[in-house]
Amino acid sequence: MPETDNGVDPRTPPAAIRPTRRRVLAAGAGAAALLGLAGRARAAAAPAPLPEGPPAPAAPVPASAPGDLAPYASYWFPDSLPSGTPGPGIVWRSLSRWTPESDPDLAHNTSTVPLAQRFTPVPANRTARAGQARIASLVSFGPTAGNPSQGSPTADHYALTHWAYIDELVFWGGSAGEGIVLAPNAPVVDAAHRNGVRVLGNVFLPPVAYGGDLRWTHDLVRRDSLGRFPIADKLVEVARTYGFDGWFVNAETDGGDSALATRMREFLRALRAGGEAHGLRITWYDAMNSTGRVGWQGALNALNQEFFEDRAGKVADTMFVDFRWTPQTLAASGALADRLGRSRHELWAAVDTESRGWDSVVDWDAIVPRERDHVVGYGFYRPEWTRNHLTDRSPGAFHRADDRFWTGESLDPSRPAADSGWRAPATVVADRSTVTALPFACSFNTGHGLRWYDGGKVVSVAPWNHLGLQDRLPGRRWAVDTAGARPSVTLDFADAWRGGSSLLVEGVPTAPVIIGLHATRLPLTRGAVLELVHATGSSEPVTVEVGVAVREPSGPGEPVPYTWVPARTRDSGQGWRTTRAGLAALAGRTAYGLAVRITAPGGKPLVWRIGALSVHDVTRTRRPAPPTAPVVDASARQDGRAWLRLSWRAAAGPYGRPRHHEVWRVLPDGTRRFLGGTCGTALHLPAVPRAGRERAAAFEVRAVDELYAVSEAARTTLVW
């Protein structure tokens, strides 16, 4: 597998690498003390590897920033560092010397969203299978060095939303010139966990041709005087402290022997034993084999079996089978997994989409045949092609491409297109959902946008991305039922109720249109209500009805049996209206799905948006408790602007921990401007301008709950 760090030529020796990078914060206790953060971290013979794809641009930073207080995703070498000097913007760190107490970015890199439980609804079509193949996704969200911890001021971002089809996401990256152990940043983990998807960090021991050094492999698997594996212990500690779910281990540095292979297997056992009690997982990449040499097998076989399962039992939870697989080797791999008493779907057959996306040539019948059981699971390598290949990388263009990748050309999983070269995941794997409890709300926020909206009003004109602020979006994009012309249904960024986006329905419908929204398992009470915030841009009125399914479809691909509930509509301001339906008549039953039905005058153009959807019990609705003790941890000022780190303490509310926190600037005239949000308790604010001759900049931090109710403000200031 190639070294994929953007901007680094893998053929260049490490000492000569000069990538373009944002500056990063120096690590260690000294840097923590410098920032005033010490003690304030609150989050308790083989072919050449595949070529790289187009580089992803680093997030922009003001050129005149006086110092870089921005936090970044963490990366390390296991112990010893490369010779020479790191390139600009790169800090070489040793994982063996990492501790939570000395980590200056800990509060920014810690995920706070627990891994949600998922369920599998009846599939939307007859070809998607439940309980068979699953999907892993290896994604490079940004460079290894300078990958922002808490989003960045650009909407050009791989804002993955099709979590319904993914089991495991690997935060792909690492390079010989920067660091080879990479921990995922908190926004990715928070978004994935909200949708029930595990996220793994990456341990990448690069090929020698890409700067790999066998001493790093020896460092990784070194035992101490008591026979323990100290780096395994550190990897467990990092994952537990940061809140992610395990490690993808990719040992591609050649030159070892059978003794090193044995040590690697023992290391994996120690890593798994240390993490198992905490729910951590290991995926092993098919590279090193039992001889200690690197020889990609494209299979699970006798040469690499011991890294997956040995005589003592499970070694790795899953294995990523190299791209060199054939139909015969996958069939043999599945059969061997069966004989070992393991699920054949714990093998991920590699599918390379980095360069050609949905035009990639894949023998799908070797992995997920239509007419018989799936052979193994599969793993996408670099599906962020859906963003990287675009000329127009606006959010709307990206989501149109991403929907096609995951759903297929029909853009409707309930009516999949005929088989072509691309077998879209929605036609293979049953979607899953985590919407199982009240209260539930969705404002169709994708985790990036061109502006930030609050109550239909623009409260920030700055583009942004932060996946931790993403909603639980409908898993099926988009299930539409109509006897007439089908309108287009897309995520749109030109207007929103809250966040950065809304659901836009556009076309010339000739009959009522049913749009399936979330698959759910919501227990309904006498006080339960469903609310839909929507707006029309059409000159003609639109009739809006809300639907609740109180039983499942009769089988895969069959219609969802919605009950259409009487509702009342009122004006909500800014051109938005709220339709509210009481669900008392359905009390004691379970909602299996939510939908909306719209009827527009026949033959008239329709432009209609959904801004928010919620189901809640009115007897339990309370505002969240405000955060406490907001403080400016560090700051720098230049030319009438300030860069600062802000932190606070979260307070438990009626539904437990807040969904997220929002930070606002209060201007001298009393107006408020949205600056950012996070699921955690710390945020970096770049280039905050001074307002006139104000003596101090005032900031408010508010907690936001699952229904987007907002707490009272906790306030702090920065004196100019």
Image (tube, rainbow, N blue to C red):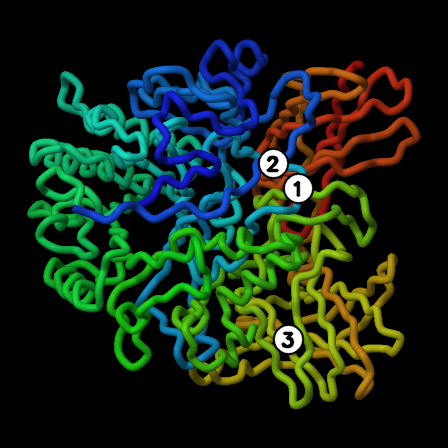
Does 368 appear above or below 220? below
Residue at the far right: name it: 669
State the residue position of label 2: 59
State the separation of the CA atoms marked 2 and 3.
36 Å
Q: Amino acid at mark 1?
A: Thr
Towards the viewer: 259 or 38: 259
Which badge, 1 or 2, comes first in the chain's sequence? 2
Q: Residues within 10 Å of mark 1 (few under 14, many from 20)?
A: some
State the residue position of label 3: 515
Q: Amino acid at mark 2?
A: Ala
**Viewer can see residue 220:** no
Q: Which mark is residue 154?
A: 1
Residue 129 locus on image (x, y percent): 36, 73
Q: Is there CB contact under 8 Å for labels 1 and 2? A: yes
> What is the secondary structure assignment of the residue under circle 2?
loop
Which badge, 3 or 1, comes first in the chain's sequence? 1
